[in-house]
Image (cartoon, helix red, strand yellow):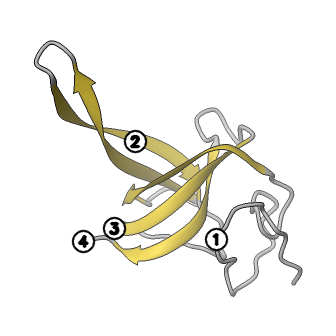
Amino acid sequence: MVVRNIGLEVKPPKSGCNDPACPYHGNVSVRGRVFEGTVSTSKSPRTVSVERAYLHYYPKYNRYERRRSKTLAHNPPCISATTGDHVTIAECRPLSKEVSFVVIDRKGVAE
């Protein structure tokens, strides 16, 4: 199985897949924003919900507040991230109504 170079410094998966929406083995190109987060749900087939936490500056109180957001991402079979995994997602073309990101790296179980 031929593995494409996606242009980011991540290790490609060792297993192969026949998914056309896979950035390594399919036709999807990765461009735009790259996020890291934790998989909160993986119940949908080949789709995961990634939750990421960040700090937002609150100027009135001159402090930061914690916020979090959820993003739906395509989960290729060669990566197969499950609930609780720490993953890296990258922006791609819209794959469905709400999915415009794809999982490009799985870093194991988050703490």
Which amino acid type corresponds to the residue marked 3 in the rendered image? Gly
Above or below — where is 13 with respect to 30? below
Q: Which residue lies under the disc numbered 3?
A: 84
Q: Is residue 99 above or below residue 107?
A: above
Q: Quadrant of the C terminus?
A: bottom left
For marks 4 and 1 on the same chain, the one whose residue lies earlier in the sequence: 1
**In the foreground, 111 or 96:** 111
State the separation of the CA atoms marked 4 and 3: 8 Å
- Neighbor class of circle 3 (other Cα within 10 Å; few <14, some 14-19, many 20+) is some
Tell me the distance, in whole angstroms, between the alpha carbons under discs 2 and 1: 22 Å
Q: Which residue is mark 4?
A: 111
Residue with the mark numbered 1: 10
* Above-or-below relation of 21 to 85: above
First of labels 4, 3 by sequence position: 3
Neighbor class of circle 4 (other Cα within 10 Å; few <14, some 14-19, many 20+) is: few
- For the N terminus, the image quarter is bottom right
The kind of residue tagged 4 is: Glu
Which circle marks residue 59 in the picture?
A: none
Kindly identify which residue carries mark 2: 70
Mark 2 or mark 1, whichever is nearer to me: 1
